[in-house]
Structures are given as C-alpha cells and as structure tokens.
Image (tube, grey):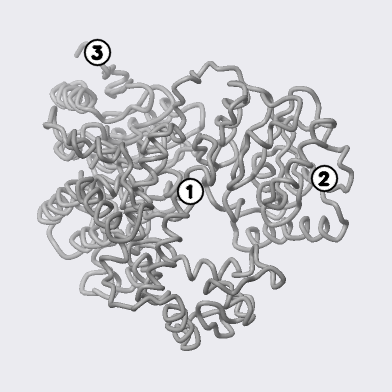
Amino acid sequence: MADTQSGVTDLKVEDGIAIVTVNNPPVNALGAAVRDGVAARMREAAADPATEAVVLICAGRTFFAGADITEFGKPPKGIPLGELVTLIEDMPKPVVAAIHGTALGGGLEMALGCHYRVAVPSARVGLPEVKLGILPGAGGTQRLPRIVGVERALEMITSGEHVPAPKAKEAGLIDELAPEEGLRQAALDFAKRLVAEGKGPRKVRDLSDKVEAARGKPEVFADFAKANARRFRGFEAPAACIEAVKAAVELPFEQGIAKERDLFLKLVAGTQSKAQRYVFFAEREVRKIPDLPDDTPTLPVNSVGIIGAGTMGGGIAMNFLNAGIPVTIVEMKQEALDRGLSVIRKNYEASAAKGRLKPEDVEKRMSLITGTLDFEALSTPDLVIEAVYENMDIKKDVFRRLDKIAKPGAILASNTSYLNVDEIASVTSRPESVIGMHFFSPANVMKLLEVVRAEKASKEVVATAVKLAPKIGKIGVLVGVCYGFVGNRMLAERQREANRLVEEGAMPWDVDRVLYEFGLPMGPFAMSDLAGLDIGWSRETSKGETLREKLCEMDRRGQKTGAGFYDYDANRKATPSPIVEQMVLDHSKQKGITRRQISDAEILERLIYPMINEGAKILEEGKAIRASDIDMVWINGYGWPVYRGGPMFYADTVGLENVLARMEQWEREIGPEFRPSDLLRRKVEAGETFTGAA
C-alpha cells in the first residue's frame, strides 16, 4: 500500500508497521477533521495485507490534548469520538498509542481504545472533563476502571488530575516507557515485538479482573462519595462520574457505554456544565487587553522588593519565591521582620510535611529572600510592592520615600484593596510607573490578582503586571481605579444588605447558611468572625451603633476570642449564639424596626442582585473590560462557586428581567441605593445578556 496523506493525518508504512501521524496544531485537539482523518487512516491500515500493526502518534508538542470543546452544543460533524474509539479498538491488527506531552480527555480515551500504550516519562495522562462539568463521554468511565482498578479510576475521573507517565505505568495504564527523544522508534520497535511474538489486539473492554473486584460492593462507591463530600459539594458532575464507574462494574460493557452516554448528555445540556465551560474560556479571555497587543513591550522583573512583612507582605513574597524570583522584604522593626520570615518558613515547612515540597525546595526558596530594616535596599529591585496599613496618608508617605530611592524604570505597585491608586501615584515624580497590584488574602493561596490600571500608568507597566500574573501562579484581572475596584466594590453591596437583612428579621446564621448552600465557602458573618471583628475598630472611637461595634465592646471579636457573631468551642466549631440572638432583637427594637419572617429566596436575592447591579455599573463605567472579567474576580478572589459561573453569568441564568424587576421593587420599597443601572435596563430592553453564554 502506498503511503497516504490527507489534511491533518498522514500514514506511512515501515517494515510492515503503519504509522498514523496526526498534525493539528497547537494541541492536536480532536475536532471533526482529525477524527475523520484518523478513521480513514485506520481503515486503510486494516485493509492493507502488508500492514501487521499500527502506531498512532502525534506531531508537535503533544499527543491529543483533548476534545474540541468549541464543538459542544453545535450540530454534530464527522465521526463521533466514541465511534472512532470503538473503530480503533475493533482493529484486526494491534494498535499502539505513542504518547508525549499530554493525553487528556478524549486524548486518553483514544489511547484507551488502542490495544497498547507507549509513553515518554514526561508525558501526562488524565480525564479532566469533570472540570468542565461533564464526564468522559467516549468510553473513558468504562475502560479506565478495567485497566487501573475502580478506586484509582474514581480518583482520576472525579479529580481530573494529570497523572505522570511513570505513575500511569505503575497503575497498568502505560505498557512501556520510551526514551524522551526516541518515542517514534520505541513505539515502532514495540509494535514489531508484538508482531514477532504473535500478540494480537488486546481490548481494554475485555479486561475484567479489576472491575470484578468491586462487583457486589456498593460501599466502595458510597465510601468514596462520603470521603470526598466536601470537595464535591454543590457539583453535579462528580456524582455522575461515580454513577458511570459503578455502571462499568455492574453492567455489561455496551450497557455501561449507554449509561455513560446518557449521563454525559444530561450534564452537557445542564447549567453547571455551561457555567464551567464559560469559566474555562473566561480564564483565557482575561489576558486579552484591547489596547495592549501581545507584542506590547514589557519590563524585566528579575527582582522584587516588598514593603511590609505582615500577613499580606509575606504571602505576596511567597508567590515570587515560588517562581524563583529573589525578594527583598523591608520592615520597620526587627521583631516584625523576624516574625514575618518565620511565618514564611513555617508555611513552606508545612507544605513539605504534606509532601507538596521537597525539603531542599524549602531551603532553595528561603535562600531567595532577604529581610532588612534598611529602606535603601529598595534601590535595586525591578518591582517594589507596598503592603502596609490601608491608610492613604501612610501609603502616600511610603511612595514619597520610594520615589526618591527606587531606580529609574522600576515599577512601583500598591497592594491597596480600596484606595485611589491615582492619588497614590500623584505624590511621585513618575506616575507612569505606578500601578495597583491587589493580592487577596491569604496571598500565597488565593489565585486572584486585581491589576489596577492607574490613569497615567504606561502601557509597558500595565502589560508587565498583566503578564507577570500567570508567572507567579495568579489569574490577573485588569481593573480601573474606583473605590474597592471590582471585587470589594461589589462586596460592599452584599455586606450592606446582609446587615440590613439581620435588622429586618433574619439572623446572622440564616444569612450565612443561604450563601453556603448557594455554594460559597462561608457567609459574611462567619467570615467576619474568622478575620476578626476588631479589624479597623478601636474602643476609643467606637460609637456602639452597629452590631459589630457592640460585639467588639463585649470582647466578642471573633474566633480568636472564642466568640463573635457565633460561639466557638476549643476546636473553633461555630454554634449560633443566644447572646447574639438577643442582641439582634434588641438592636432592631432600638432602631424602631418591626422584625418579619424573611424567606431564604429573599435573602439570596437581596444579597446577590445588588452585586449584579453594581457589576453592571462597573461595566458601564469601564472599570472592567468584560462581564467575564468580573466573574473571574469573584470566582478566584471570593470563592464564588465555579458551577454558577460568576455573578454576571448567574444573572443571565436567572434572567436579567427578573433582576431588574426586583431592583425596581426594592428601589420603591427601601431606597435609592437599589436604583437599577442604565446598562441593566438597556440589556433587558434589547433582550441581551451580560455574558452571551447562559
């Protein structure tokens, strides 16, 4: 048979082995053209009497990195992936998958359809569909348990983890590891050995030992779900994944495939999967800045200075240390500096104790940090980040000093969470070098970085900050200067209504419960107790007008004192407080408010809809580029549930007309702070949505 090439696939025959090569840059996504091409080449190899085995390999940087998710929801084209996997599995000649880069999602399902798998040690395999709110829909939930066992398959499928090739080999998923630079030849040699030893196709679907071990043991699935209940909370896809793997154990293969397909179709049509796919693209879209093309020059950031070694300063430092960037951290007092450096070390040692870091990595990262009391040490770093107390006068004083010391061209950044970055920049002789870099606490954990674009900041400075974010493990969202920027500006709306709902008839734990059941990690009152009610409070200036002030005056300052809005036991477990309940009743009476029963539905709407309205104002004012950027802020900075897609996506799912109607009602009944934004009105009148994705 002559060698053939068609579109993105190519077939060559060497020594009786057909080598099918796919070349569909950048990641060999399994779009219709790829699927049809592979199917055609496989049929040609099957029909060629001179071909004794087949090697399936990909050109470029990776094996199939997954399905083409842009095809989801569109009319089907080409051979379905499940049919292609079956076609490969039913080949009369052994098929060897040669894996480099990643074999993810549909890519791993393709490899599972092959009879044997060879991979380079650096390759990784996985089924990450759960992160898109779906499950593997081309036999992955049925074949994987048959080759790695039920427990391992459950973990891989419900976590979406990427498994390194050596570990995949230990699990039985990979048959042989190949030299990093010799995959093609190793796969060819492997195929020749199969032929020489008379080994034919080995179908994964026919393997049964590892699924039979779990047959008749429903507790395997119940125990797994229970053990991971916290991780799976609110998500629909993990439960469906467990159900699909259970079908692999209890049903014949074809019935299991049908069950998998049914579960897949239900998920892909659901709101959660739409939300999670929307988030997938929104995370990539956030890097696109209309007036900053990819070729915008950036400034080198080979060293960083940080002012303040407290919780924020230390956490910010860790991000740069993790990326291998040296940090100089400046404090005013030796005690504060020693404490800050000690906390950083303890954080790293805790990670090492959990196996997330090697002990030598702890020392390597700590060797990159220099602590000093000498402000003059900030004369050399390329980027200096101020992380001092949230007070405009203090920050201005810091920047005046910094302006005199920092080298020409250095980026001067403020970690302010509310204050006007333009005003901070105004006290320097180089406002073009000043920008906001708002990290979220704990800064070494939270993924969000609000990059605040000051009015006079140069494009090079802005581009540098935006491109630096992913290098230090952050999702950087470019926002404009306004009080609270995007996240805290919207949070203020929610906090106001949380306090007002408690005055009107709800209890703090009612408000917290509603938000927790919605999917957030905790509500505003539990969060206040965790952070400490006395942040920004002083006994000398307290007027005792708010519940928070009254609680602080009673030394109920949150978890650290064993009491706040809640009572806490020795393990910091919270229970509703009878003392606070009576305080709430007295507080309402004192303010002349007749309390009423408030439904969970009203609590949720009163907390969320004003946030959405504020988000619309932010878009209207140009303080965020896209609605999806706002959603990225809330998902990565405040724990908004991914499966609800962010506040603006959620607004589209509940209907903008419903949000508008409630805001108009509350404006009439409560006050002007509920006045709907003009953009919200225009969207409703035009029948449009914020995100176009719901």
In primary-sequence order, the first of circles 2 and 1 is 2
Q: Amino acid at mark 1?
A: Arg
Q: x, y percentage for residue 545?
A: 55, 72
Q: Nearer the viewer, residue 551 or 64?
A: 551
The image quadrant where one finds the N terminus is: top left
Q: Which mark is residue 5?
A: 3
In the rendered structure, find residue 489 and report the number of the disc placed on it. Answer: 1
Q: Residue at x 33, y 73 (%)?
A: 223
Residue visible at 45% across and 38% down in the picture: 123
Q: Residue 252 appears at what percent x and percent y? A: 12, 59
**Residue 114 is at least partly visible in this image:** no
Q: Residues within 10 Å of mark 1 (few under 14, many from 20)?
A: some
Callout 2 amino acid: Thr
Q: Which residue is mark 2?
A: 370
Residue neighbourhood size for the residue with mark 2, other residues' Cα within 10 Å, grouped as few (<14), some (14–19), many (≥20) = some
For the residue labelled by badge 3, is the local secondary structure a helix, a strand or a loop?
strand
Determine the CA span between mark 3 and mark 2.
59 Å
Q: Is residue 218 visible?
A: yes
Q: Tell me the quadrant of the picture where the C terminus can be found.
A: top left
Q: Is the Cβ of the residue at disc 1 closer than 8 Å to that at disc 3?
A: no
In this rendering, position of residue 477 left or right of residue 201: right
Q: Is residue 192 left or right of residue 659?
A: right
In the image, which is nearer the foreground, mark 1 or mark 3? 1
Point out the tag, 1 or 3, that comes first from the N-terminus. 3
Distance from disc 1 to disc 3, alpha carbons, whole Å, reads 57 Å
- Secondary structure type for disc 1: helix
Crowd band around label 3 with a 10 angstrom C-alpha radius: few (<14), some (14–19), many (20+): some
Point out the tag, 3 or 2, that comes first from the N-terminus. 3
Residue depth check, mark 3 versus mark 2: number of the one nearer the observer: 2
Q: Residue 437: x and y, percent?
A: 61, 39
The residue closer to the viewer here, 106 or 683, is 683
